[in-house]
Amino acid sequence: MHKIQAGFTVRPISRFGQAVEPVASNVDPSVDMKTPPKIQVDTMPAGKFFAYAAEILKLQPPHITDEPILAQMQRIGIERGKSFDIDKLDPAIKTALETAPRTPLP
């Protein structure tokens, strides 16, 4: 089975029948490629986590079914299309985000 899979190639139809060209990419050296993503997220300070989430929301629009959670996020200062700065929050909200208990996922 693996031999068959190894023989597959993917390319645009416009390139069908032509030689495969390697994909050029630039790796951001500031990205930690050694620490597993879950550990990176689990150890990220609250301000960095929510700021990162806000930036992702700028690039990847949420699904329509995410509206309820977006409304909850807006209550703590995370708004679609806007950057997030934990230091600009009400001190009580900032403290709550920074000290919220971490519940491990199964």
Image (spheres, rainbow, N blue to C red):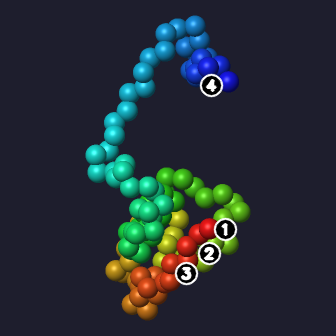
Quadrant of the drawing holding the N terminus = top right
Q: What is the quadrant of the C terminus in the image?
A: bottom right
Which corner quadrant of the image does residue 16 belong to?
top right
Residue placed under numbered mark 2 in the picture: 71
**Residue name at image x 48 percent, y 61 percent:** 38
Residue type at the position of mark 3: Arg
Mark 3 crowdedness (10 Å alpha carbons): few <14, some 14-19, many ≥20: few
Residue 105 spot, x, y in % from top left: 59, 69
Q: Nearer the viewer, residue 104 or 92?
A: 104
Residue shown at the point (40%, 69%) measured from the top left: 43
Q: Amino acid at mark 2?
A: Ala
Decide: is 23 above or below 46.
Answer: above
- Among numbered discs 3 and 4, the one appearing first in the sequence: 4
Nearer to us in this view, 5 or 14: 5
Looking at the rendered structure, the secondary structure element under dot 4 is helix
Residue furthest to the left in view is 29
Residue holding disc 1: 67
Q: Say which residue label 3 marks.
A: 75
- Give the mark nearest the N terminus, 1 or 4: 4
* 88 over 34 or under it: above or below: below
> Does residue 4 show up?
yes
Residue occupied by mark 4: 2
- Are circles 1 and 2 on residues that touch, CB within 8 Å? yes
What's the distance in space between the residues labelled 1 and 2, CA to CA?
6 Å
- Between the residue at mark 3 and the residue at mark 2, the CA separation in whole angstroms equals 7 Å
Contact flag, marks 4 and 2 (Cβ < 8 Å): no
